[in-house]
Amino acid sequence: MTGTHLLFISLALSLGAAVEVQRPRGVPITKRQFYDENLPFTCLDGSRTIPFDRVNDDYCDCKDGSDEPGTSACPNGNFHCTNAGFRPTFIPSSRINDGICDCCDTTDEYNSGAKCENTCKELGRKEREVLQRMAEITKEGFLLKQQLIEEAKAGQQERQRKLTEMQNSRKEMEEKVEALRTVKETAEVPEKEAKERHLKAWEEQKATSRAEKDKAKMTEAFFELDDDADGFVSLAELQTHAELDSDADGSFSETEAQALFGGAEQVDTAAFERVWSNIKDKYVSESQPVEPTPVTTPPEESKEPLTDNDSEPYPDDEDILEEEEEEEDDEDDFAEEDLDKATPTTRSPEKKEEDEEAMPPYDSETHALIDVMPSEVAVTVLSSTAAQKARDDFEESERALREVEDQIKNIEKEISFDFGPSAEYTYLYSQCYELPTSEYIYRLCPFNRVSQKPKYGGSETNLGTWGAWAGPEENKYLLMKYEHGTGCWQGPNRSTTVKLTCGKETAVTSTSEPSRCEYLMEFTTPAVCQDPPNVDSSLPGHDEF
């Protein structure tokens, strides 16, 4: 076997002994057993068997390219970079001897003449430093996570204790509300009865007053219609009031008048009561003053010549202010004059009518129930009625009960959240974290919503409300999903995926919009940190040769 076919390497073991491992170029140690130079080579896909001297002969014999691990003969082949001191890796066989150093140990450019430098030890050193820093962060974050878990347990116990306490308090308050409801309803009975009696008496008084007024108007109308004062109203006398024309044709005929009389030729005062009920809505009393028709006088023609509106100068602001002040002074003068002239006892007919229709003040008996709260020792306590005090007490107890129920709902809602396997994410509840960018301020409120607001003014946009944990099956607590945000123009509703990573600090580190209306936010928190592995075990314990 020539030097191009085989590569001789040595493995330094912990005991200091060196073992020489012989294998073809580009073959990892894990596949050394398939390349025995004393036996024919069988393609790794089992498609055919060839003499071993055709391995790495720069001709592709196997469909899977396994016979040419160290040349670029097979388009689907892969070359193994040993990279002693760093991480071994595979590169496509097409990159072998292409003049570009892909392997840090330079083994891919063995026959290209390219000047490559072995950088594996330096890369390994830098990677170990990065891993060391990451391990330190993870370790500190994991310690913080343990504290968060302990705090969450204590908080959960406190919330459960408070919930039990408030639930017991709610039962007592419900009983108190029902007791005060009974007191209120009992206290309201005499008050309600007194008010109803007063209202009934007032309604009866109004009915009597209206009946007397209606009778007076009827009597007045009878005497107005009885022109000859013979004690009867005739058809002719009724026809003098054209406003009683039943068909509104402009002519109040004898037939129409007789219909109002019920077929009679004339009626006396007793029969007129029936007629009055049919005509009183239309009848216009002769004593009612007739409103004079307003006379419009034509405006005097201005003797000054008309000017073009465009050429009319605008008044100065000072002139306008002076005019407004003068008008205000005039208005004040007029108001004072009107007040001086007005007589306190003067009332318009409409106002007088309203005053007469208004319910009169409560009598002394009703006032005794409404304005005074009696006590068992006959001590009069002013400023509050028994019924009103009972209502106030009941409403106050109801308000306190509602507040307790709201607090119970909030605690139950918080307890129901999935805050992680050990409740390590509890501390994020009711908190918000912001990330300013050049254009927006992004705001994440875990278990609530995500939003963005223009940095220099503008309304806030909802990027999604809390949906669920959305990480992979092995750890769903690595992703948060927020959905049903503000709709995009001719697009879907905005949504945000929050990617959680381990960190000592709790902060939003970046935001992006990978797809239209779909946002990605990265968030660091100690709650994600796991117990870190040994840094030395993250890299191979020995160099592969």
Image: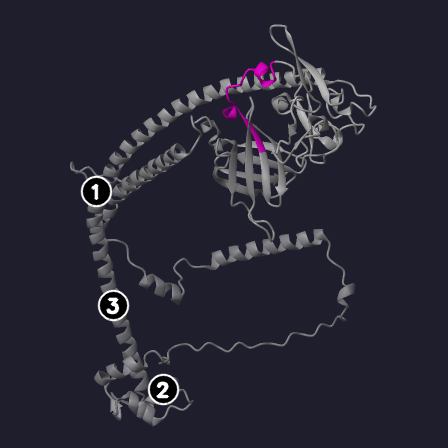
Q: Position of residue 422 (x, y in %)?
A: 42, 25
Label 2: few (<14), some (14–19) or many (≥20) C-alpha neighbours in 10 Å: some
Q: CA distance from mark 2 to mark 1?
A: 60 Å
Q: Is residue 201 above or below residue 519?
A: below
Q: Which residue, as the protein is rendered here, is positioned at the far top? A: 16
Magenta residues (range): 522-541
Residue 92 shows in this picture: yes
Mark 3 or 2, closer to the camera:
2
Q: Say which amino acid is labelled 1.
A: Val
Q: Please, is residue 354 above or below residue 245 in the view?
A: above
Which residue is identified by label 2?
246
Depicted 132 relative to depicted 197: above or below: above
Label 3 crowd bin: few (<14), some (14–19), many (20+), radius 10 Å:
few
Whole-percent x, y for residue 139 in the image = 53, 17
Count numbered badges in the picture.
3
| Residue at (30, 30) in percent of width and height | 164
Helix, strand or loop for disc 1: helix
Q: Nearer the viewer, residue 251 or 271?
A: 251
Q: Position of residue 478 (x, y in %)?
A: 52, 31
Quadrant of image for the C terminus: top right
Label 3: state its secondary structure.
helix
24 displayed left or right of 393: right
Q: Earlier in the sequence, mark 3 or mark 2?
A: 3
Residue indicated by mark 3:
207
Q: Position of residue 32 (x, y in %)?
A: 63, 22
- Let me know if residue 97 is in the magenta part: no
Distance Cα–Cα, label 1 vs label 3: 36 Å
**Tag 3: residue type?**
Ala
Q: Quadrant of residue 47?
A: top right
Residue 221: numbered disc: none
Question: For the point 53% across and 76% down, which residue is it?
Answer: 294
Circle on res. 183: 1
